[in-house]
């Protein structure tokens, strides 16, 4: 009956993480998956989140189905986090938000919505982008193309080429953008570059689709939402999927959201209705628990304050690891420029290593990274950063 079913080739990120866990070498180092590990190599339980969860559990009560669009307190807390409580887009009711199953679930609901209501639109993603972006949009039946982004020569951005490509796209093309902490390169647009990009998107009639999975890991919670707010203030209509997996260390709770910024409240109501239709015939409604933990952290001033501090400490630790890796590499391979480790932001850096070099690192040194050469800097710690840099230098040198 099922012999014709092709075998699953595995996922370039998740399968690698599974291989890491099967590796018996005790000195192995996991820089593969985008998860924040603390300095002891553990996934942290944030104190603010633990206390919020205690309150949610203590409240107890029945577990009815949530509405299709998710819990009202979660949805409004997400809008305040993304746009700020006073933003006109929020106060005028022109943002349609659903609670989604992680931000991946949100991305997929948005992709299905686009395939149904903008069937002629192609999707344009950065070259490179998160491996799953292409898969998700193609899975929804949309054609996926790339726009220039990463400049391998400088470890920076091909901004002029990016703008030139976007200027030439047909109206209503979907442009997938990373709001901060670009995955996989760590190369972000500066504020000035966002300000130059926004009129291009608007004048060409394009539909931005922002992915904000790492809010708080770049320059801070508010700073990392700058692009979202700037697009909304400029009057663009756009999609934004955001996640609490990393920012609250709640990976398995699958707490995320999809928001669509619309021209007015009447259109937002239409969009919300069709997003609900999409959800109902997909997974019906989201789970309760993770969303309530998130809403409790975001709406209780004391818990929110603690969370901001904890997230700040995670961001600072990543920056310290960037500096440590940079220092050892520069000492081992003088004359080479590793400055990009310091300028790239968020959990990821593109090392510029080839797939063959990545394979050697894994096989000979038990250092795991994605074959594109991406490392998760948050997998480094004071005990393994030196060994990582030495191994990288051995393979590069
Ligand atoms: C990553 O890029 O490693 C993370 O976003 C985890 C995932 O689902 O791929």
Image (spheres, rainbow, N blue to C red):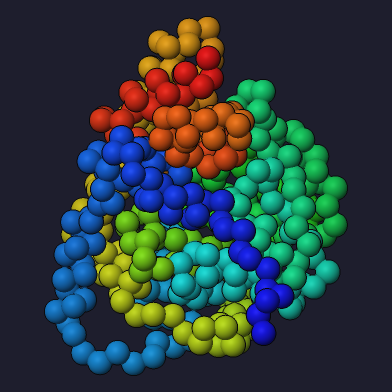
Residue depicted at 30% across the width and 64% down the height: 298
Residue in front for this viewpoint, 224 or 125: 125
Across and down, in percent, residue 13 comes to 51, 51
Determine which quarter of the picture holds residue 205.
bottom right
Across and down, in percent, residue 270 comes to 64, 83
Residue in front for this viewpoint, 88 or 147: 147
231 left or right of 283?
A: right
Residue depicted at 46% across the width and 24% down the height: 392
Residue 192 appears in view: no
Image quadrant in which the N terminus is located = bottom right
Q: Is residue 385 above or below residue 33?
A: above
Q: Is residue 344 above or below residue 243?
A: above
Residue 198 appears in view: yes
Extreme residue in the top direction: 335
Residue depicted at 61% across the width and 35% down the height: 355
Residue in front for this viewpoint, 89 or 341: 341
Across and down, in percent, residue 137 comes to 68, 64
* Count of marks placed on residues: 0
Across and down, in percent, residue 311 comes to 30, 48
Determine which quarter of the picture holds residue 5.
bottom right
Determine which quarter of the picture holds residue 8.
bottom right
Residue depicted at 59% across the width and 73% down the height: 109
282 left or right of 387?
A: right
143 left or right of 396?
A: right
């Amino acid at each position: 009956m099922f012999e014709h079913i092709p075998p699953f080739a595995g996922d370039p990120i998740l399968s690698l993480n599974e291989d890491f866990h099967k590796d018996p070498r005790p000195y192995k180092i996991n820089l593969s998956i985008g998860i924040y590990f603390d300095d002891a190599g553990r996934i942290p339980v944030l104190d603010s989140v633990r206390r919020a969860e205690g309150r949610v559990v203590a409240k107890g009560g029945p577990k009815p189905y949530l509405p299709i669009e998710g819990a009202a307190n979660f949805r409004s807390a997400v809008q305040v986090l993304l746009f700020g409580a006073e933003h006109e887009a929020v106060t005028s009711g022109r943002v349609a938000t659903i609670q989604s199953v992680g931000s991946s679930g949100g991305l997929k609901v948005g992709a299905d919505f686009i395939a149904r209501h903008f069937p002629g639109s192609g999707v344009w993603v950065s070259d490179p982008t998160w491996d799953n972006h292409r898969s998700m949009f193609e899975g929804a039946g949309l054609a996926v193309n790339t726009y220039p982004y990463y400049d391998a020569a400088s470890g920076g951005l091909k901004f002029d080429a990016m703008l030139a490509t976007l200027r030439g796209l047909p109206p209503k093309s979907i442009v997938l953008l990373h709001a901060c902490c670009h995955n996989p390169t760590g190369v972000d647009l500066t504020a000035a570059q966002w300000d130059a990009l926004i009129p291009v998107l608007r004048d060409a009639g394009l539909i931005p689709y922002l992915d904000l999975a790492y809010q708080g890991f770049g320059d801070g919670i508010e700073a990392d939402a700058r692009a979202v707010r700037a697009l909304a203030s400029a009057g663009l209509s756009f999609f934004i999927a955001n996640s609490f997996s990393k920012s609250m260390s709640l990976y398995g709770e699958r707490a995320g959201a999809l928001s669509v910024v619309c021209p007015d409240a009447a259109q937002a109501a239409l969009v919300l209705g069709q997003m609900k239709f999409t959800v109902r015939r997909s997974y019906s409604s989201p789970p309760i628990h993770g969303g309530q933990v998130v809403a409790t952290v975001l709406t209780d001033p004391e818990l929110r304050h603690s969370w901001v501090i904890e997230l700040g400490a995670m961001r600072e630790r990543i920056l310290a690891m960037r500096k440590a890796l940079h220092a050892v590499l520069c000492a081992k391979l003088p004359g080479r420029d590793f400055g990009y480790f310091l300028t790239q932001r968020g959990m990821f850096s593109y090392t510029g290593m080839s797939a063959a070099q990545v394979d050697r690192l894994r096989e000979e040194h038990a250092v795991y990274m994605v074959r594109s050469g991406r490392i998760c800097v948050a997998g480094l710690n004071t005990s393994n950063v030196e060994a990582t840099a030495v191994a990288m230098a051995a393979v590069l040198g």
